[in-house]
């Protein structure tokens, strides 16, 4: 069909990404990379599939060749969504060896005796697959974990990628408006979830790669998704950590909506501290600073207000292309990290406080783009308490 492939960037952009990958490969002494993360395959070629949960891999060689090995179910996705000119189909018979299929792929590209970088740090490279590959390749070629090198390739976003994230952020802001409007006493949580989903799909967004951990009552204290919906009580709090993708590029926002007779002064005081901590962390997001300095800025704000008991191990993470089951990407905002921040990295910072005395939990999280003169906010959390 004339309108295929349905790629979302120019071929020149993909060529620059391939060149960046080849240069990283040569700099680290590898002859090829074996990718197992759908996010990297999508970034490199446009290939849009979540086949990682069964089996697939993409080979990239130092001289710029790209080849895909996947299941028959992914065959049409290759031609529909990517700049790939073909693919090698894995023979899914009982007893078929994925390791031997990988070896055949490498052999076709003259990599016997070569040095291959394998992407281990991904949902797509499980322990059983590792055992298969080791059995097939040991003694035939040299291979080792290249995840740290591969993971850095997508950290700094191009202008075209940032524009995708702006479009995601526009949808997230509409989701926040819908969430605030729907959060009232007596409303079933499922109705609020439905409003969020409707906003995503009506604005051409992608469903969130993460099942967002949102809820009211006791569920408002949770940091992970749980099953079973509730009704909003007459006096309640609803925690929203929501986001979505646009062409798989994700942004997120974090805020709370209070319902009824809540301790408003305490809420306001806590929220001011959280917003101060968030802003202090964002102020440290400058090229050349470290991720650890961002974590330290948030922690120091809490300590200044005698809230040392609320220090956290992590306050956020990098965001970008995301496939299920998560939108979390390295580097995490953790203490003592020497990871250097670069311009046009995109980060979701969301410090929070849970007050045992009042039973309130407050947080404020925004997705930003790092710039030399200060961050560009993609999502903007509501300022001050929201009480419906």
Image (spheres, rainbow, N blue to C red):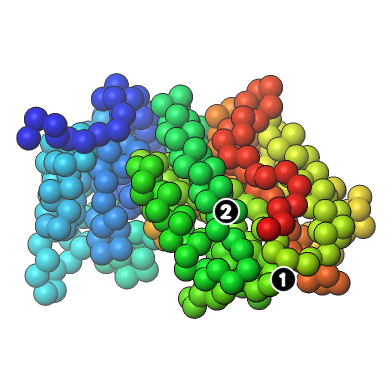
- Looking at the rendering, in which quadrant would you find the N terminus? top left
Q: Secondary structure at mark 1?
A: loop
**Up/down of 101 relative to 94, above or below:** above
Q: Residue at x 10, y 62 (%)?
A: 91
Residue 289 seen in this snapshot: yes
- Left or right: residue 266 versus residue 354 is right
Q: Residue at x 46, y 55 (%)?
A: 196
- Residue 139 is labelled as none
- Looking at the rendering, in which quadrant would you find the C terminus? bottom right
**Up/down of 350 relative to 9, above or below:** below
Q: Nearer the viewer, residue 377 or 31?
A: 377
Could you tell me residue 247's position as x and y percent? Answer: 36, 41
Q: Secondary structure at mark 2?
A: helix
Mark closer to the chain start, 2 or 1: 2
User: Label 2, label 1: how many angstroms apart (C-alpha)?
Assistant: 16 Å
Where is residue 241, by image quadrant?
A: bottom right
- Residue 235 is labelled as 1
Residue for badge 2? 181
């Amino acid at each position: 069909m004339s309108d295929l492939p349905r790629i979302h960037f120019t071929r020149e952009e993909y060529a620059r990404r391939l060149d960046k990958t080849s240069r990283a490969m040569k700099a680290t002494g590898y002859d090829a990379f074996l990718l197992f993360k759908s996010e990297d395959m999508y970034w490199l070629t446009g290939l849009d599939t979540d086949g990682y949960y069964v089996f697939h891999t993409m080979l990239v060689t130092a001289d710029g060749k790209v080849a895909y090995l996947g299941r028959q179910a992914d065959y049409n996705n290759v031609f529909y969504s990517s700049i790939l000119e073909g693919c090698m189909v894995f023979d899914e018979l009982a007893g078929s060896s994925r390791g031997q299929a990988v070896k055949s792929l490498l052999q076709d590209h003259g990599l016997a005796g070569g040095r291959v970088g394998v992407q281990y740090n991904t949902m797509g490279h499980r322990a059983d697959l590792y055992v298969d590959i080791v059995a097939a390749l040991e003694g035939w070629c040299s291979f080792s974990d290249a995840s740290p090198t591969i993971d850095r390739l997508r950290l700094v976003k191009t202008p075209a990628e940032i524009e995708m994230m702006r479009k995601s952020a526009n949808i997230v802001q509409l989701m926040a408006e819908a969430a605030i409007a729907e959060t009232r006493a007596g409303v079933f949580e499922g109705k609020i979830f439905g409003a969020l989903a409707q906003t995503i799909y009506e604005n051409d967004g992608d469903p969130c790669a993460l099942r967002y951990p949102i809820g009211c009552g006791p569920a408002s204290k949770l940091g992970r998704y749980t099953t079973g919906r509730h009704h909003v009580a007459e006096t309640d709090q609803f925690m929203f950590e929501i986001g979505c993708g646009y062409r798989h590029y994700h942004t997120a926002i974090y805020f709370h909506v209070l319902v009824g007779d809540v301790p408003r002064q305490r809420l306001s005081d806590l929220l001011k501290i959280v917003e101060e901590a968030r802003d202090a962390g964002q102020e440290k997001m400058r090229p050349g600073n470290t991720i650890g300095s961002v974590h330290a800025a948030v922690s120091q704000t809490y300590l200044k207000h005698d809230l040392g008991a609320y220090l956290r191990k992590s306050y956020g993470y990098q965001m970008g292309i995301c496939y299920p089951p998560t939108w979390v990407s390295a580097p995490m905002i953790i203490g003592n990290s020497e990871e250097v921040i670069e311009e046009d990295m995109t980060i979701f910072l969301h410090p929070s406080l849970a007050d045992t005395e009042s039973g309130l939990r407050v947080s404020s999280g925004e997705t930003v783009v790092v710039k030399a003169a200060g961050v560009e906010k993609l999502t903007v959390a509501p300022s001050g308490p929201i009480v419906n």
